[in-house]
Amino acid sequence: KFLKIRKNINNKQKEYEGQYFKKFLGVIIFYFISLVAVSNLLWYFIPPEDFFNYIQNPGEHLLLLGILFCASLLFTLDITYLQEKFCVYVCPYARIQSVMFDHDTMQVIYDEKRGGLIYDGHTKLHKKPPEGECIGCEACVSICPTHIDIRKGMQLECINCLECADACSKVQSKFNRPSLINWTSAKAIETRSKVHYLRFRTIAYFIVLLIALLALIIMGSKKESMLLNINRSSELYNISNIKGELVISNAYTFLFQNTDSKPHEYYFTANLEGINDGIEIIRPNKPFKLKAGEQVKKIVVIRATKNLANNDKKDVIFPLHIKAYAKDNEKISVFRKSIFVYPKSTLIKDKNELK
């Protein structure tokens, strides 16, 4: 409408021809709109100030730029080419609708009793029925964005936009009659009664949705009051000499976050699976406080307290169990798993010989 590509926006069945420059210009405009829309979506995951810094260095952020341009292209394709075809072929609602449908379901319906019979199945009997209020103007057909004739009855392509009902209302108002196309149910049309909203199917769906909502509330109420993310350092292990003894230690980065509404004092324990008193925490050596919503990174160093080497060919990997907790609230705790790497026995032997 803005570029005046269509001469008449009320007739969506007539394909517009020519005006290739305007079409190209329209695609370019929608692509820039799509870029803005996708960028706005990405800002949920990347702060805007970082986002603009990243796109100034495209070579270092190819994944981000790939997502940005591909998603923008997909949006543009949807707006300029797929259009209402998305509702017919892609959107799952039309498929789900068939499961939820019954004789009392609200839908867009042509009133055959008033308007007259025009179709017998898919066969068109009349353009204007000999007996009926439909005048055969086909305003409802021309305005339809999915290119169907609602007078055929219920069709998968119908997206319930009610543009046909509005078009019919304008025509019928000239005869002081209500629209022949309405938002109602098949049973209400046949019996000339009110739509039955409370029935077994709607009550059953309401109960199912209520159960799902309660499940979400229960699951949400059980969220962890603290978060812990563990990353190992790039170095497998560190071998140091302390008072003439070789000591093996592993380093980690712990990211703690207090998701509770109150401040807490945190610490953690660590142990190797199947081994008692095999390790000790060197750093940090005391608890630390976090305010509500605060997060902090801690460099954690865990040291072996005894010789764990039981393989002379390769390094040994032990499962490591971490329990982080709030010292002032025993109910707040999380469990995480990582690994502790100990060098092979031949390496320990070689290091001892060099002392």
Image (cartoon, rainbow, N blue to C red):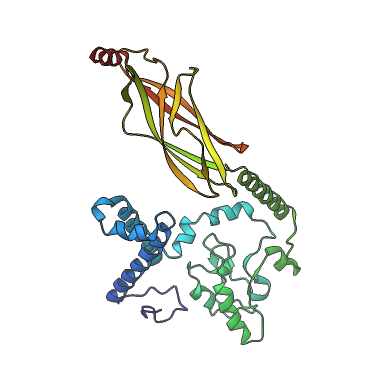
Look at 28% across and 74% down and name the residue there. Answer: 20
Q: Nearer the viewer, residue 344 or 292?
A: 292
Residue 315 in the image: state x and y as whole percent: 33, 19
Nearer-the-camera pick, 46 or 34: 46
Residue drawn at 44 percent across, 57 percent down: 44
Residue lying at 68% horizontally and 52% vertically, measured from the top left: 205
| For residue 104, side relative to residue 279 (left or right) | right
Residue closest to the eye, 145 or 226: 226
On the image, the x and y values in percent for residue 341 come to 37, 23
> Quadrant of the image for the C terminus?
top left
Asked if residue 126 can be seen in this view, the reply is no
**Image quadrant where residue 163 sits:** bottom right
User: Taking 333 as reference, is 105 above or below it?
Assistant: below
Quarter of the picture containing the N terminus is bottom left
Please tell me in which quadrant of the rendered image residue 318 appears: top left
User: Is any atom of residue 241 visible in this view?
Assistant: yes
81 lies left or right of 223: left
Residue 275 x, y percent position in the rendering: 48, 17
